[in-house]
Image (cartoon, helix red, strand yellow):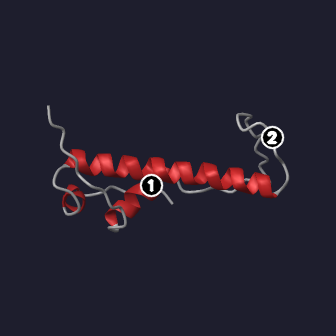
């Protein structure tokens, strides 16, 4: 599923300003990516294929499963209201 154009008004309904919205979506994308990495590592351990974590796995076109990009997932979660964040103030 590709990402379609998002009207600014949809984003403004969820956050006070665009910077805040982008920061929230970026943080959610990072959490989503971290979750995928951990899940993949757990799956490899369960399959008893314990290797060095830094090795790049060769993809076989026959077994490749396409997933939505983490940015697409994060943006959709943000627009659906599933992303929670807390504003912090920086005091000098």
**Secondary element at image label 2:** loop
Task: Pick whichever, 77 or 89, lies toward us.
Answer: 89
Estimate the x, y position of residue 66 in percent, counting from the top left. Answer: 64, 55
Estimate the x, y position of residue 22 in percent, counting from the top left. Answer: 30, 47
Q: Is residue 66 left or right of residue 24?
A: right
Q: Residue furthest top?
A: 92
Q: Residue at x 19, y 63 (%)?
A: 13
**Secondary element at image label 1:** helix
Q: Is residue 43 left or right of residue 66?
A: right
Q: Residue at x 50, y 53 (%)?
A: 32
Task: Pick whichever, 52 or 5, lies toward us.
Answer: 52
Q: CA gap, disc 2 to disc 1?
A: 30 Å
Q: Is residue 47 left or right of residue 78?
A: right
- Where residue 39 sits, quadrant-wise, is bottom right
Where 56 falls versus 14 (above or below)? above
Where 59 falls versus 73 (above or below)? above
Whether residue 3 is visible here, answered yes or no, is no
Q: Quadrant of the C terminus?
A: top left
Label 2: how many Cα within 10 Å (few below 14, some 14–19, many 20+): few
Q: Residue at x 17, y 50 (%)?
A: 17
Query: Which residue does the numbered mark 2 point to in the structure image?
Result: 51
Query: Which residue does the numbered mark 1 point to in the structure image?
Result: 72
Query: Sequence order check: which comes first, mark 2 or mark 1?
Result: 2
Estimate the x, y position of residue 24 in percent, counting from the top left. Answer: 32, 51
- Mark 2 touching mark 1, by CB under 8 A? no
Where 58 falls versus 48 (above or below)? above
């Amino acid at each position: 599923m590709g990402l379609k154009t998002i009207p600014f008004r949809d984003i403004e309904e969820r956050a006070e300003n665009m910077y805040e919205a982008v920061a929230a979506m970026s943080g959610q994308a990072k959490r989503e990516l971290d979750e995928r990495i951990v899940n993949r590592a757990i799956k490899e351990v369960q399959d008893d294929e314990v290797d060095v974590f830094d090795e790049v796995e060769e993809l076989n076109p026959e077994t490749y499963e396409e997933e939505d990009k983490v940015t697409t997932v994060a943006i959709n979660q943000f627009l659906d209201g599933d992303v929670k964040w807390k504003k912090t103030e920086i005091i000098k």
